[in-house]
Amino acid sequence: MSDHNLLQDYSNGLVALVEAVSPAVVGITHGRGSGSGVVIAPDGYLLTNHHVVHGTRRVKVNFQDGDEAIGAIIGNDSKTDLAVIRVELPTRVAFMRLLDKREVKVGQVVLAIGNPLRFERSVSWGLVSAIDRSLPAQGGLLEGLIQTDAAINPGNSGGPLVSTQGTVVGINTAIVPYAQGLGFAVPAYTASWVAGEIIHKGKVRRRYLGVSASGVDVPARLADRPNSIRGIHIHSVETGSPADRGGLRQGDILTRAETHELWNMDDLQRVLALGESRAIEVEVIRNRRRIVKTVEPRDLREAA
C-alpha cells in the first residue's frame, strides 16, 4: 500500500471518529462563563469541570443539532475539578463511555473536542505526553492528570479527551498560561467513580487520614509485584490523626489499600470513598520492608 493510501486511510478514520463522537459534546454557558461538557449516559447526565459551573445551579446546554436545554447541577467535586449536570436530552443524542481502567499510554493518539473561545466543537489532535502529572488548582492539588500536546484553550474545559477507539480517556481541565503544547485532563479512570458518586449520592464522600502525601515511583528493587511500580509517599503525619493512631509514619510509601494498588492520592481517595468498612488495611514500604497496618479513617465532618 502506498504512503498516500496510508495517510488517506488514517485521515478517513479520524473523520469517521469525529463524526461519531461529536454529537455527545455540548456547550455550557451561564452568567459567569462558558465551557464544554460531554454526555455520559442516555438518561441525561453530562460531565464537565467544577470550575466551569462553580457558583451557579443551572446552565444552558447547547447540542450539536442546535437544540438548547436548561441543565441542573447535580453535584460537583472541587478536589478533582469535576461536576455532573442533568438535562432533558433531545432525541437521538449520542453519549460516550468513560474508560474506567488505567490503560492510557504515553504516545497514544488522542483528540480534544470542545468549545475553545466559543468556537463550537473544535477538534484538535495530538499525543498523550505524560501521565500522573500534578498541578495546583483551586481545590488543592490535582493528581494523576494526563498531559497532552493536543491544543486545549479556554472553553475546552469540561470537554472530552478521546481515544482512537472513541472512548473518553480524560476530561480536559487545565492549561499552563503562556506555554504551548501543555494541556491537562482529569483521567476518565478518576471521572468514572467521581461521576458515579455524584449521580447516586449528590457528592463525593471524603474521609480523613491526616497525612500530607503525593504519588511517587517505587524504586525498582522494591517493586516486587507487576503493578507495584507506583506508590504514595507520606511527607508528614498529623499527631493524633487516624494515620498516626494506625501506625503510619513520615517516609512510608503506601502501595496498597485493601486489594487496590495505589498510584496516587486519587486512588486512595477512591478506596476511602467507596469502601463501606470503618477500618481499612494498608500496605507500606518502610526501611525496604513491606509491612501491613490497619487504619480507621474518619469522615471529614467528624474531623472538623
Image (spheres, rainbow, N blue to C red):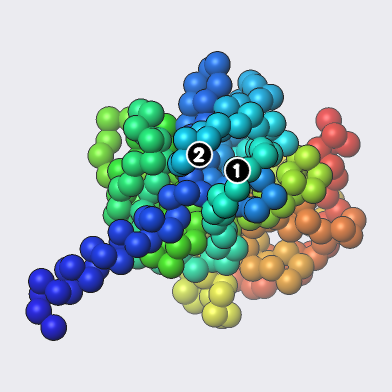
Q: Secondary structure at mark 2?
A: loop
Above or below: residue 51 compared with residue 22: above
Work out which residue is located at the far bottom of the displayed protein and give it: 1
Name the residue carrying label 2: 63
Residue at coordinates 64% horizontally, 68% vertically from top-left? Answer: 261
**Alpha-carbon distance for marks 1 and 2?**
8 Å
As drawn, the label of residue 182 is none
202 left or right, relative to 30: right
Above or below: residue 242 compared with residue 120: below
63 left or right, relative to 116: right
In x, y percent, where is residue 270? Answer: 70, 55
Given contact means CB atoms under 8 Å apart, are the residues at marks 1 and 2 in contact? Answer: yes
Q: Amino acid at mark 2?
A: Phe
Residue at coordinates 86% horizontally, 53% vertically from top-left? Answer: 296
Is residue 16 in sight in this rendering?
yes
Name the residue carrying label 1: 90
Quarter of the image where the N terminus is located: bottom left
In x, y percent, where is residue 87? Answer: 66, 38
Is residue 253 in sight in this rendering?
no
Badge 1 crowding class, 10 Å Cα cut-off, few under 14, some 14 to 19, many 20 or more, is: few
Badge 2 crowding class, 10 Å Cα cut-off, few under 14, some 14 to 19, many 20 or more, is: many
Q: Locate residue 131: give its quadrant.
A: bottom left
Of 230 and 102, which appears nearest the observer?
A: 102
Residue at coordinates 42% horizontally, 62% vertically from top-left? Answer: 163
Quarter of the image where the C terminus is located: top right
Above or below: residue 54 compared with residue 39: above
Q: Nearer the viewer, mark 1 or mark 2?
A: 1
In x, y percent, where is residue 41? Answer: 64, 53
